[in-house]
Image: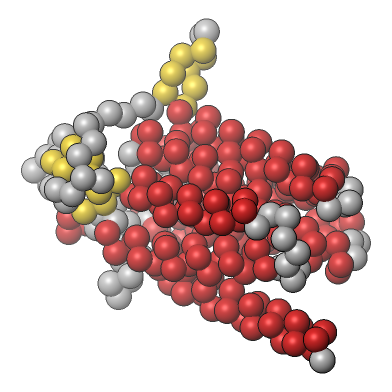
Amino acid sequence: MLPWFQYLSYGLGPLTIQVWGSFVALGMFLGLYIVHQRAKKKGLEPQILVDAGLWMIIGGLVGARIFHVLFYEPGLYISHPFEIIRIWHGGMSSYGSFFGAGLALFLFVKKRKLSKALIFQSIDIFAYGALFGWILGRVGCFMIHDHLGKPCNCFLAIQTPDGPRLEMALLEILGLIPLAVFFFVLRKKKKVQGWFAAVLFAYYGILRFILDFFRASPADANITSSFYIPTDARYLGLTPAQYFSILSFAVAVYLLLKMRKQETSFKD
């Protein structure tokens, strides 16, 4: 079992820097760097993809906040509307960032009038880079423990002031590392355009759907303890992320089936 620790911030001269934000920023830079390098190797214009990536980062941050407000704590933000803009108080949705990034990419494509061929090539590059950046960002979640799970005495649990609990960010990191290795091994293999994105949607959808069953719910929080346990809302027994995971997996299956038909038509 892991001993308790929590690194919320660190000093840099007169500044106080948030640990979570630092890892998220590093993840964004890593993702953009990978996108830039893979674009060059694929013979694409790197700057176009980096520009699109910046749009996606902004859209992802906005989408993450909007989804959290709408689906996770709507009552809180109705009562305290100014909290909506106080993102430093926490509250971001993973799937909200995906939807926001996707919408930003759509708007970027429309603005730049990019070709469909470039769009499909770019989606795989973004999926590849996003995976590695996402893992690094989740390290920030692990450092501050903002996604604790249900009480558990297993070796992957962490000894919180409220007792031993699962550490969901750690479990997600461990779950995503095999996919990152798989992607890295296959990075030079020729695949149908959209393959990396579809596999990422399917894999993350399954992983997140399973993991969210072990996230802390309001019923798991110890109201007699002074230690705050962040909990996820439930709708008919499922978290918002689980519903979006089902949608993510369905989209991935649709894309993979469509790719298979394309491969069959090429062979014929």
Left-right relation of 242 to 179: left
Between residues 223 and 12, which one lies in front from this camera angle? 12
Q: Residue furthest left?
A: 224
**Image vertical order of residue 102 relative to residue 59, above or below:** below
Q: Position of residue 81 (x, y in %)?
A: 45, 48
Q: Position of residue 164 (x, y in %)?
A: 16, 43
Between residues 16 and 150, which one lies in front from this camera angle? 150
Q: Is residue 50 visible?
A: yes
Between residues 188 and 111, which one lies in front from this camera angle? 188
Quadrant of the rendering where the N terminus is positioned: top left
**Image vertical order of residue 257 relative to residue 168, above or below:** below
Q: Position of residue 16 (x, y in %)?
A: 47, 18
Q: Residue furthest top?
A: 13
Q: Residue furthest bottom?
A: 268
**Image vertical order of residue 140 relative to residue 130, above or below:** above
Q: Residue at x 46, y 43 (%)?
A: 138
